[in-house]
C-alpha cells in the first residue's frame, strides 16, 4: 500500500517490490544513466560511531594512522568543515536518514524517543526509484528498519565480541567473531552473493566502532604499547566563564571508569560499571579470553601496584584511553580497506559514491573530556570523505560548511531522484562538481536535548558561522556563550557580554533567530539582544 507524505510517495513492506511504479522509476533511472553515457550510480555509505577527526590521519597526524580512510580522501574529496545537527548517536542517525533536524524527524534523544520508521527517508525514496537497499550493523533507533531489501542490525549499541544480530525474520542470533569484521563480512557477502548485479544499489555499513568501551580485537591488543600519549593543551581546563561545562559527567579523571572503560578488572576492586564489564567478558570464548587475560593481567597488576594519584593518574587514564581507541580504529581502517578493495577488484568503484563519516565527533582529552554532546568543535565536527563516481572530477578539500542533514538530499540528487521539499538539508552535489555556489549557507544550526541523562550535558542550541559561535544553554542553566574561533580555536574564553563584542553578538543573534525560523524550531527564547 502507498502512503503519501507531502509530495513523496513511500512504499511499505512487500508492496515495494511488487509495485509497477517502482519498476517504472527504475527504468527511468536506467534510461537517464544510459543517455548520460554512464552506469547507474551506486552508493556505499560507511558510518562509524564516535570517530572523531582527531583520530583520522588525513585530518590530524598526532595519534592515528588510517591509510584506508585516507585513501578515500586522497582519491576523492575531504570536507574540512563537516558538522552534525545533534551530537548524539540515535538523533544524528535520524537526521542523516531524513535530511531533517531532530525537532522535525521527532527523534531528539536516546532516552525518551523512538524513531518513527514509517516516515520518509532517503532509503525509501531510493528504493522507490528501483535501488536495491541494505544495511548491516548498528541501527540504534528503537524501531526496526524500513525501506531496506536486506538488513541485519545489532541490538542497541551492539557487542564487540561474538555479537548478536537481529535478522529480518525477527530472530536474534549470536555470531562468532569481532563485530567490525562481522559487519564487513555481511556487507561483502551481500555485494557478492545476494544483490542483483544488474541493478543499482545503496549499501549502508554501520559500525559500532569506535563507541565506548573501546574493546580491541585480540589481534591488535599489543599495538601502540610502546608509545606514551600526551594530553592536549587544555586537558586541565578549569571551565572559567562557563556554567554548563563543569556540570558534565564525562571527565576522564572523574568519570572514566577504571574497570569498564580502562579494563583494570581485579576481583578485589570495584567500580560503578564493574558488572557491565564482566558481562562483556563473558561473551568471549576461551581462546579470546585467554588472549585478553594474557595481555591485560600484567598491566592490571602494574597499575594497582603503583597507586597513582592526581595528575599522574589522570594522564595514565588518558594514555590508556587513547591506546584502546586507536586499536579499535585500526580494525575499522582495515575493514574499510576490504570494502574498497572489493569495489575496485569487481569493477564497481568507478560508478560508486563511497562515503565515510561518523555519527559525530568525540573528545580525546580536550577540556579533560571523553564523549560528545556539546556544540564545542570536537563533537560538533565530524569527519567526512568521499570517493566520487565518474562524472565528478573534483578532488581535494571542500571548505564550505556542510551538515549531516545534507546527506539525504545529496544521495537523492546524485541518483537522479527528486529531493522532497520538506527535507531541510541541501544537496552537496554542486560542491562535488567543484562549484562554489554564491548562495551556499553561511551559518549552521545545532540543538542538543538529552538532559538530564547520562553524562549530564545541559540542553543547548546555537549557531556557527565561519568565525564565531553563539550558544545558549537553557533549562536548568541559562547562559549564553560566544567564541571567536579564529582567536580562540579551542573555545576556552567565553567572550559573551564583553565590551567590544556587541556588534558580533547582534549579528550572531540575528543569524540564530533566522535559522530557528527557517527550520521551524518550536523552542525559541526571548533574545537579550535584538
Image (tube, rainbow, N blue to C red):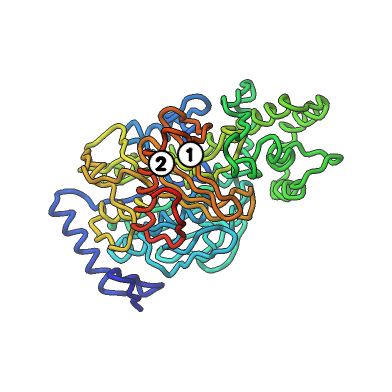
Q: Is residue 357 visible?
A: yes
Report the front residue among 495 and 341: 495
Q: Are marks 2 and 1 in contact (CB under 8 Å)?
A: yes
Task: Describe residue 530's horizontal placement relative to residue 93 as left or right.
Answer: left
Q: Which mark is residue 430?
A: none
Which residue lies at the image location 38% right of the left edge and 44% below the top edge?
506
Query: In the rendering, at what x and y percent does residue 512 appear?
Result: 39, 50
Could you classify mark 2 by the number of other residues whose Cα lies within 10 Å: few (under 14), some (14-19), or many (20 or more)?
many
Task: Describe residue 360's horizontal placement relative to residue 248 as left or right.
Answer: left
Q: Is residue 327 visible?
A: no
Circle 2 sits on which residue?
505
Badge 2 marks a residue whose secondary structure is helix
Task: Describe residue 48's horizontal placement relative to residue 37 as left or right.
Answer: right
Query: In the rendering, at what x and y percent does residue 332 appear?
Result: 51, 39
Which residue lies at the image location 63% right of the left edge and 29% below the top edge?
236
Q: Name which of mark 2 and mark 1 comes first in the sequence.
A: 1
Badge 1 marks a residue whose secondary structure is loop
Q: Is residue 240 above or below residue 271?
A: above
Kindly indicate the quadrant of the structure image that contains residue 256: top right
Circle 1 sits on which residue?
497
Q: Residue furthest bottom?
A: 1
Q: Which quarter of the rendered picture does the N terminus lie within?
A: bottom left
Could you classify mark 1 by the number of other residues whose Cα lies within 10 Å: few (under 14), some (14-19), or many (20 or more)?
few
How many angstroms separate mark 2 from mark 1 (CA)?
A: 8 Å
Query: In the rendering, at what x and y percent does residue 445 appear?
Result: 40, 49
Which residue lies at the image location 29% right of the left edge and 47% below the top edge?
428
Query: In the rendering, at what x and y percent does residue 229 appear?
Result: 61, 24
Kindly indicate the quadrant of the structure image that contains residue 399: top left
Q: Residue furthest right?
A: 268
Q: Residue furthest left?
A: 35
Report the front residue among 437 and 415: 437
Amino acid at each position: 500500500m502507498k502512503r503519501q507524505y507531502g509530495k513523496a510517495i513511500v512504499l511499505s513492506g512487500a508492496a515495494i517490490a511488487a509495485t509497477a511504479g517502482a519498476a517504472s522509476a527504475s527504468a527511468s533511472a536506467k534510461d537517464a544513466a544510459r543517455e548520460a553515457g554512464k552506469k547507474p550510480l551506486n552508493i556505499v555509505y560507511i558510518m562509524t560511531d564516535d570517530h572523531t577527526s582527531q583520530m583520522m590521519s588525513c585530518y590530524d597526524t598526532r595519534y592515528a594512522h588510517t591509510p584506508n580512510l585516507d585513501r578515500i580522501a586522497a582519491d576523492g574529496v575531504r570536507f574540512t568543515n563537516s558538522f552534525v545537527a545533534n551530537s548524539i548517536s540515535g538523533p544524528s542517525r535520524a537526521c542523516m536518514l531524513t535530511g531533517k533536524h531532530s525537532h522535525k524527524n521527532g527523534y531528539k534523544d536516546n532516552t525518551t524517543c523512538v524513531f518513527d520508521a514509517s516516515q520518509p527517508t532517503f532509503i525509501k525514496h531510493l528504493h522507490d526509484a528501483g535501488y536495491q537497499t541494505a544495511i548491516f550493523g548498528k541501527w540504534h533507533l528503537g524501531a526496526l528498519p524500513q525501506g531496506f531489501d536486506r538488513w541485519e542490525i545489532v541490538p542497541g549499541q551492539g557487542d564487540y565480541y561474538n555479537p548478536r544480530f537481529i535478522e529480518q525474520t525477527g530472530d536474534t542470533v549470536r555470531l562468532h567473531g569481532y563485530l567490525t569484521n562481522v559487519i564487513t563480512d555481511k556487507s561483502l557477502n551481500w555485494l557478492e552473493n545476494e544483490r542483483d548485479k544488474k541493478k543499482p544499489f545503496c549499501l549502508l555499513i554501520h559500525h559500532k566502532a569506535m563507541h565506548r568501551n573501546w574493546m580491541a580485537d585480540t589481534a591488535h591488543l599489543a599495538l601502540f604499547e610502546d608509545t606514551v600519549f600526551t594530553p592536549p593543551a587544555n586537558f586541565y581546563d578549569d571551565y572559567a566563564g562557563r556554567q554548563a561545562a563543569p556540570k558534565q559527567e564525562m571527565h576522564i579523571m572523574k568519570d572514566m571508569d577504571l574497570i569498564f572503560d580502562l579494563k583494570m578488572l581485579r576481583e578485589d576492586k570495584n567500580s560503578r560499571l564493574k558488572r557491565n564489564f564482566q558481562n562483556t567478558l563473558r561473551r568471549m570464548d576461551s581462546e579470546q579470553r585467554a588472549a585478553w587475560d594474557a595481555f591485560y593481567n600484567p598491566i592490571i597488576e602494574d597499575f594497582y601496584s603503583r597507586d597513582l594519584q592526581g595528575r599522574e593518574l589522570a594522564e595514565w587514564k588518558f594514555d590508556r584511553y587513547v591506546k584502546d581507541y586507536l586499536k579499535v580504529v585500526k580494525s575499522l581502517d582495515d575493514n574499510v580497506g576490504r570494502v574498497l578493495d572489493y569495489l575496485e577488484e569487481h569493477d564497481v568503484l568507478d560508478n560508486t559514491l563511497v562515503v565515510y563519516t561518523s555519527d559525530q565527533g568525540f573528545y580525546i582529552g580536550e577540556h579533560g573530556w571523553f564523549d560528545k554532546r556539546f556544540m564545542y568543535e570536537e563533537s560538533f565536527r565530524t569527519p567526512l570523505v568521499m570517493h566520487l563516481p565518474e562524472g565528478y572530477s573534483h578532488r581535494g578539500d571542500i571548505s564550505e560548511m556542510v551538515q549531516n542533514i545534507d546527506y539525504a538530499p545529496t544521495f537523492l540528487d546524485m541518483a537522479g531522484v527528486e529531493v522532497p521539499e520538506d527535507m531541510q538539508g541541501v544537496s552537496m552535489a554542486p560542491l562535488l562538481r567543484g562549484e562554489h555556489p554564491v548562495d551556499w549557507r553561511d551559518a549552521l544550526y545545532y540543538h542538543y536535548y538529552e538532559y538530564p541523562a547520562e553524562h549530564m550535558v545541559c540542553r543547548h542550541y546555537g549557531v556557527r558561522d565561519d568565525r564565531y559561535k553563539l550558544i545558549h544553554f537553557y533549562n536548568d542553566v541559562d547562559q549564553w556563550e560566544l567564541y571567536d574561533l579564529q582567536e580562540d580555536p579551542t573555545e576556552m574564553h567565553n567572550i559573551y557580554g564583553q565590551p567590544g563584542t556587541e556588534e558580533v553578538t547582534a549579528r550572531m543573534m540575528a543569524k540564530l533567530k533566522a535559522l530557528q525560523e527557517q527550520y521551524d524550531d518550536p523552542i525559541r527564547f526571548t533574545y537579550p539582544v535584538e
